[in-house]
Amino acid sequence: MDFALSEEQKMFRAMFEDFSKKEIAPVAEALDHEETLPLTILEKAGRQGFLGATLPEEHLGADLDFVSYALLMEALGRDCMSVAVSLGTHVSLVAMSILRHGSEAQKEAYLGILAAGGDGGRDVRLGAFALTEPDAGSDTSRLQTRAGMDGEEYVIDGVKTWVANGEMTGLFLVFAEAPGGMTAFLIPADTDGVTVGYREPTLGLRNVPFNTVYLEGCCVPAANRLGEEGDGREIAEAAGERMAVTLGAAALGVVEDSLEVAAQFATERVQFGVPIAEKQAIQNLMAESTVDAEALRHLVYHGAWQVDRGGGLGSVGSVVKVFAARVAQQVTNRMVQVMGGYGYMEDYPLARKYRDARALGLIGGPTELHYVRIAERVFAGRDVAITP
Ligand SMILES: Cc1cc2nc3c(=O)[nH]c(=O)nc-3n(C[C@H](O)[C@H](O)[C@H](O)COP(=O)(O)OP(=O)(O)OC[C@H]3O[C@@H](n4cnc5c(N)ncnc54)[C@H](O)[C@@H]3O)c2cc1C
């Protein structure tokens, strides 16, 4: 067993951290308060090749292995979880789904554009993943979005909610019920019948546009179907497993930076005549959180390594996701405590990290549904019915 990063991975990590510190950290607080789309950052990320991080060079990608990509997410997560979520949605959910399940023609048509962040238009354009609906959240077996055949085309009607990157997307990966079952479709944002609607105001992740998207008589050729009719569930689950590790890596970044911010604060803040860092209660909060951070690091890197080995992640993705959400929420909560009232002020970065971390128990499927998948493994081979 080799737990060491390669020299190349270490070099990438330094480069990612450098980018994040220079381009994101100085503006992250202001962006959060203004709830602005981080278009300039994403354009710069595109120039670095991050938008095509795991895509092969033939599709203008950076050809990173998943461990290196996890290091990128970790670095971005340290400074701005919103940027990590937008980029993770684009790469892990959309671009890699096309790479894994797309035809050669689809790869040719879409991957280069995704890696470039658009087709040369004014704004950067990312991919968006449209699965959730008003009445289909955890239970995606009840999608109301319908895809019917009309000659050589599909006609798609429905409403999608919580679509990350909605108003800055060029391409939706949409899941709909077709005659052969749940099916995935690639729908360019400028297709007639597609309307990007309401942007959801949220507790955290305030730089990610989460939109409702309306599909009304939206016609796409059969060539825009990703995989076969009925493959939608498998495509969504594989994407969800990659996203679990992606979010886990971003969570690791949030945890690490929160620890650093609070450690520095505790060293400078004097109460009862000494820095509060010298109080054992504070040391315990820091130590307990460091244990959690180290455990999360190993789980995330192991998950990423397993993605690189190919095949499905199965319940490992759920284990990473559940633990990452728990650790990120607990550690940011503890670090607010370490910083006292200053931790609760919006002028200090902990408040933002605390709000952002809360999303991790919901985004990519709620913790309770991941428990179901883990329980399937626990009771495998026994006569126990596990249903959500
Ligand atoms: C920040 C954020 C970003 C998101 N981004 C996207 C995106 O880009 N694309 C997309 O398609 N979706 C996205 N989503 C949607 C997300 O996947 C759903 O919110 C999630 O699947 C849960 O659905 P729901 O919100 O409707 O909750 P519900 O399904 O209504 O669940 C409500 C509560 O009931 C629990 N529950 C439900 N069923 C069971 C059960 N059988 N057993 C035990 N408990 C149960 C849930 O765990 C939860 O606690 C995003 C959500 C958030 C919060």
Image: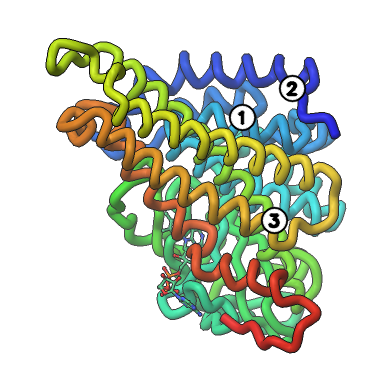
Q: Nearer the viewer, residue 24 or 253?
A: 253
For disc 3, the neighbor class at 10 Å (few under 14, some 14 to 19, many from 20) is many
Residue 301 percent coordinates (x, y) = 69, 37
> Dot 1, how many residues are within 10 Å of its Cα: few (below 14), some (14-19), or many (20+)?
many
**Is residue 57 visible in this depiction of the protein?**
yes
> Does label 3 or label 1 sit earlier along the sequence?
1
Q: Secondary structure at mark 2?
A: helix
Image mark for residue 9: 2
Q: On the rendered image, what quadrant is the N terminus found in?
A: top right
304 or 151, which lies in front?
304
> Distance of mark 3 from mark 2, alpha carbons?
23 Å
Who's the residue at 56% across and 40% down the image? 87
Q: Mark 3 vs ligand 1: CB under 8 Å?
A: no
Residue 170, x across and y down, in percent: 56, 48
Q: Give the quadrant of residue 184.
A: bottom right
> Does residue 149 appear anywhere in the picture?
no
Where, by quadrant of the figure, is residue 143 drawn? bottom right
* Towards the viewer: 383 or 229: 383
Q: Nearer the viewer, mark 3 or mark 1?
A: 3
* Circle 3: residue type: Val
Q: Amino acid at mark 2?
A: Gln
Task: Give me the residue at 71% from left, 46% from top.
Answer: 303
Three-letter code for the amino acid on which mark 1 is drawn: Leu
Q: Earlier in the sequence, mark 1 or mark 2?
A: 2
In the drawing, does residue 129 fall left or right of residue 286? right
Where's residue 66, x and y in %? 74, 38
Neighbour class for label 2 at 10 Å: few (<14), some, many (≥20)? some
Instruction: Give the residue number, with chain letter if any, for mark 3.
Output: 316
Q: Residue at x 52, y 35 (%)?
A: 291
